[in-house]
Image (tube, helix red, strand yellow):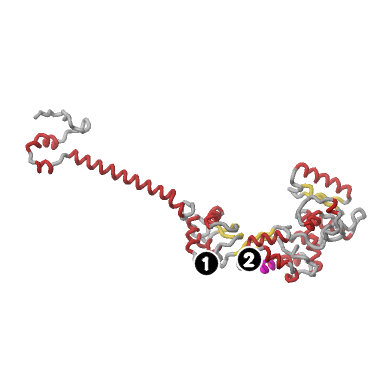
Amino acid sequence: MSRVHPGDTPADSDEEAGEAPDPHEFLYEHTAEHMPLSSRRAQRPARERRKRRRRRTIALTAALVFFAAVVVFAVSFVVPFFTGGDDSMADYPGPGTGSVKVQVQQGAPSIGIAENLVDSGVVASTGAFMEALAADDSGNVIQPGTYELKQKMPAAKAVASLLNTDQTAVHYAAVDRGLRQPQVFKVLSEASGIPVKKFEKLAADPTRFGLPKQAPSLEGYLSPGEYRFPLDAGAADIINMLVDKTFANLKKAGVEGKKEQYRVLTVASIIEHEGNPKSYEEIAGAIQNRLHEPIKEIGRFIQSDATVTYGLGRKSYQVTDKEKNDKSNPYNTYANPGLPVGPIGSPSLPAIKAAADPPENPYYYWVTVNLDTGKTLFAERHAGHVKNVNKFQQWCDNHQGRCQ
């Protein structure tokens, strides 16, 4: 047996330099060979115990790191997959504020509707919306159309509004000024989900809505504006809302009698297409002069391009000489004196007021010389009008494609 001097490190020791020797280990090395086997097993070295503790610590740490990685993966990838791509199931407490218009397209998937609602600020997350939609047992489906909803709504409330299980839900439609009947019907159809053909069928009998017998359609009586109507409203109900507003506007303008109302709406629709609100009154005065105080060079011809193109079934700033000379077009105010057979669009209240009470002025001619700003120039005689038309042509040359 070799002697171990104090301070020496045994050749087979794996302890780090500078670590004090374990007296138990020293004793074990010098007495182990004289100890019974059972005693040696009962008195294992301390270094073995330290090794086992280190191994357990390393294994536990590795397990914790692996578990954390699994949690991060699940939160980042798995949960969004099942909640429609959203990173949470966040929901607003409600009741919501303000309002926003949301368009639901024909055939739009539920997740697409949810994403649109999140982008519009209606709901907090697609996950909350999809969960609320799945929980609905009404049997209803979301219909295409334009909905007016509050922002920051609870997902369940938004679902109820879209499914018509919320009694406060309505359809929303915005009818711009100057739209023709086919365009108005398209707007109403998109908002309500009612086929255009149903509106067209009703329009074939204008008298059922209080229009005079001479009216060939509902043109001119479909008042522009914003409308909110019940989700169960039919085509006739919706048309009545627009027509009633037109009669209300005529009343505000002091126009009585079906015949006079029809005349005023016809003039107002021309004014609406020929200018902008700033020029309505002057154009109305010029039309009044042509109809009731005609001059030799133009007679009682209104000479409106807008009426000609309406009769041709198109919208354009360009009218050929052949089209201007076509008397068979009942809306041709170049070839036929006086007013056309009826309105050419949906006039607004300002246009109706201007047509009902046109102010006196010396003008017989007008032309819009800037389509972007709506700037309109007026003239008393043809020579001055030609100069103004040249300005319009110059604007068109500088803005290719805008005057088609």
The residue that mark 1 highlights is 139
Callout 1 crowding tier (Cα within 10 Å): few <14, some 14–19, many ≥20:
few
**In the image, which is nearer the foreground, mark 1 or mark 2?**
1
The residue that mark 2 highlights is 229
Mark 2: which amino acid?
Phe
Residue at image coords 55%, 63%:
141
- Asked if 278 appears above or below 223 in the picture, the reply is above
Kindly indicate the quadrant of the structure image that contains residue 284. Answer: bottom right
Question: Residue 215: percent from the left, percent from the top?
Answer: 78, 66
User: Does the magenta-highlighted stretch encompass residue 220?
Assistant: no
- Asked if 86 appears above or below 239 in the picture, the reply is above
Relative depth, front residue between 10 and 22:
10
Q: Is residue 383 visible?
A: yes
Query: What SS does tag 2 mark?
Result: strand
User: Does the magenta-highlighted stretch encompass residue 235?
Assistant: yes
Relative depth, front residue between 329 and 238:
329
- Asked if 125 appears above or below 34 in the picture, the reply is below
Residue at image coords 72%, 61%:
181
Q: Is residue 363 visible?
A: no
Left/right of residue 283 with respect to residue 197 in the rendered view: right
Question: Residue 258: percent from the left, percent from the top?
Answer: 79, 69
- Looking at the figure, which quarter contains the N terminus? top left
Q: Main secondary structure of the magenta part?
A: helix
Residue at image coords 75%, 68%:
206
Mark 1 vs 2, N-terminal side: 1
* The magenta segment: 234-240
Relative depth, front residue between 119 and 378:
119
Question: Residue 4: percent from the left, percent from the top?
Answer: 12, 29
Left/right of residue 329 with respect to residue 242 in the rendered view: right
Mark 1: which amino acid?
Gly
